[in-house]
């Protein structure tokens, strides 16, 4: 039922538009390419025959596939929203992406034509051994691919086309939402939940195939400001208090062999000092606080404050302020309030006779924030591998599987 060639064509078209998010930009979206891709998608949705397609002032694309199922007397059909983001990560350039299609993958390492130092190795990508004979898409090694999240965009566009071509498939209203600047933490800044009007949403931004991300980290950001006393070093004796030294001692007191990204995986959280700037007078250190258990963030903040007190005691004259800002919360709490969000996604896999896994994300998704705001939003696999890297690749059959799953999922929601 899914048109493979058309899905591949879409993906290749979308990744060649540079939508790299630009951190620190003063505009929204942060880069003009996101508007170019948004307009292209809005036009394609209109060409498919959708009415009321909107490419809004912030560059978000909104559309609805009307219901085909009969409304039951006792309840309205739930509205299912599907979301993907238009931007790509600023960590690797997305300019001049030259996608390389490998048909009937024979197995083995995949050298990338544009950069001899970049090879996709089977040893680092064990999932490749399951994909022999499939169609893979890689970069030429000089850019990222942008399957994060243009695989999600292409999957959603192909879902729409499939539903329109097969009006006999019974489903409720399906809301389409493409967002901007997810990679720099602003994916849902301009998402109005009342306007979306959905019962449930799914982000199509997950790795591999057949996974449902049902938990994310809970996250806070600590900004630690260390203040010293600056004075000309020639007369510094007994008077100078060097904030750099104090900051170095502070960072040294943070856990290293536990509670750090370098030493944890699975369900274990961490404290991650990731940026430092300043001089003798003042230094700012930013620290990520992460755990699946939201209450642990308080323990982590206490640990930072304790380290700050110890440094102040050790280096007289310095001051340290620890400021904690909330970022996002584990979606598990919000998903529990609408059990159908995950159960229906599992049921759709079950009907397709596919094994699925419930997985956890050691990070956040736009779904973490949407869920916290009251819209339950698990994340679904969409064929992403090695995101944010020149070694990024995707698999056409995994993208196709994601479309098939969505078709089944909207049918399940019309029934349950
Ligand atoms: Zn993404």
Image (tube, helix red, strand yellow):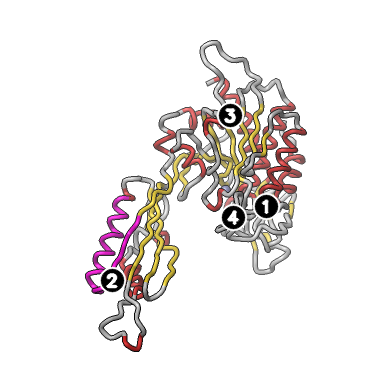
Q: Residue beneath label 1, please?
A: 32
Check the image and report above or below for 266 versus 346: below
The picture quadrant where one finds residue 321 is bottom left
Q: Does label 3 or label 1 sit earlier along the sequence? A: 1
Q: Residue beneath label 4, please?
A: 89
Marks 3 and 2: CB-CB under 8 Å?
A: no
Label 4 or label 2, whichever lies nearer to me, is 2
Q: Residue beneath label 3, please?
A: 409
**Residues rendered magenta in the picture:** 298-323
Q: Does label 2 or label 1 sit earlier along the sequence? A: 1
Label 3 or label 1, whichever lies nearer to me, is 1
Q: Is mark 1 within 8 Å of ligand 1?
A: no
Quote the CA–CA distance across marks 3 and 2: 58 Å
SS assignment at label 2: loop
Q: Is mark 4 within 8 Å of ligand 1?
A: yes
The picture quadrant where one finds residue 407 is top right
**Residue 121 in the image, given as x and y percentages of width and height:** 61, 60
Q: Does label 4 or label 1 sit earlier along the sequence? A: 1
SS assignment at label 3: helix
Q: Which mark is residue 318?
A: 2
User: In the rendered structure, does residue 405 fall within the stretch colored magenta?
Assistant: no
Please give left or right for residue 366 compared with residue 296 in the image.
Answer: right
Quote the CA–CA distance across marks 4 and 2: 38 Å
Please give left or right for residue 237 compared with residue 379 in the image.
Answer: left
Marks 3 and 1: CB-CB under 8 Å?
A: no
Quote the CA–CA distance across marks 4 and 1: 15 Å
């Amino acid at each position: 039922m899914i048109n493979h060639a058309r899905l591949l064509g879409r993906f290749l078209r979308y990744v060649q538009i540079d939508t790299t998010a630009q951190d620190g930009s003063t505009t929204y979206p942060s880069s003009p390419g996101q508007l170019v891709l948004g307009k292209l998608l809005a036009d394609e949705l209109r060409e498919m025959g959708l009415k009321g397609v909107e490419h809004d002032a912030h560059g978000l694309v909104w559309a609805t596939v009307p219901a085909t199922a009969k409304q039951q007397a006792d309840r309205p059909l739930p509205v299912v929203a599907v979301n993907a983001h238009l931007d790509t990560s600023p960590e690797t350039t997305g300019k001049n992406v030259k996608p390389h299609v490998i048909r009937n993958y024979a197995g083995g390492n995949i050298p990338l034509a544009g950069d001899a130092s970049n090879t996709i190795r089977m040893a680092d990508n064990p999932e490749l051994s399951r994909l022999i004979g499939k169609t893979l898409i890689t970069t030429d090694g000089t850019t990222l691919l942008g399957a994060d999240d243009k695989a999600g965009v292409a999957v959603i566009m192909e879902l729409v086309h499939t539903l329109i071509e097969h009006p006999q498939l019974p489903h409720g209203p399906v809301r389409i939402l493409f967002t901007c600047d997810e990679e720099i933490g602003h994916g849902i800044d301009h998402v109005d939940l009342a306007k979306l009007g959905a019962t449930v949403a799914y982000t199509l931004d997950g790795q591999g195939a057949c996974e449902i991300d049902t938990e994310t980290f809970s996250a806070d950001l600590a900004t630690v400001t260390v203040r010293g006393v600056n004075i000309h070093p020639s007369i510094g004796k007994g008077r100078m208090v060097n904030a750099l030294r104090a900051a170095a001692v502070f960072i040294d007191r943070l856990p290293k062999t536990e509670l750090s990204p370098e030493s944890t995986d699975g369900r274990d959280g961490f404290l991650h000092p990731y940026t430092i700037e300043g001089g003798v007078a003042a230094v700012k250190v930013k620290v990520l606080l992460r755990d699946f258990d939201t209450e642990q963030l308080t323990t982590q903040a206490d640990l930072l404050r304790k380290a700050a007190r110890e440094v102040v005691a050790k280096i007289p004259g310095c001051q340290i302020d620890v400021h904690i800002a909330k970022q996002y919360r584990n979606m598990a709490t919000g998903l529990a309030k609408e059990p159908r969000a995950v159960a229906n996604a599992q049921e759709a896999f079950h009907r397709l006779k596919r094994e699925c896994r419930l997985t956890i994300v050691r990070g956040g998704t736009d779904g973490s924030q949407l869920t916290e705001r009251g819209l339950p939003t698990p994340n679904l696999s969409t064929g992403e591998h090695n995101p944010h890297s020149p070694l990024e690749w995707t698999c056409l059959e995994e993208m196709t599987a994601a479309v098939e799953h969505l078709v089944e999922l909207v049918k399940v929601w019309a029934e349950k």
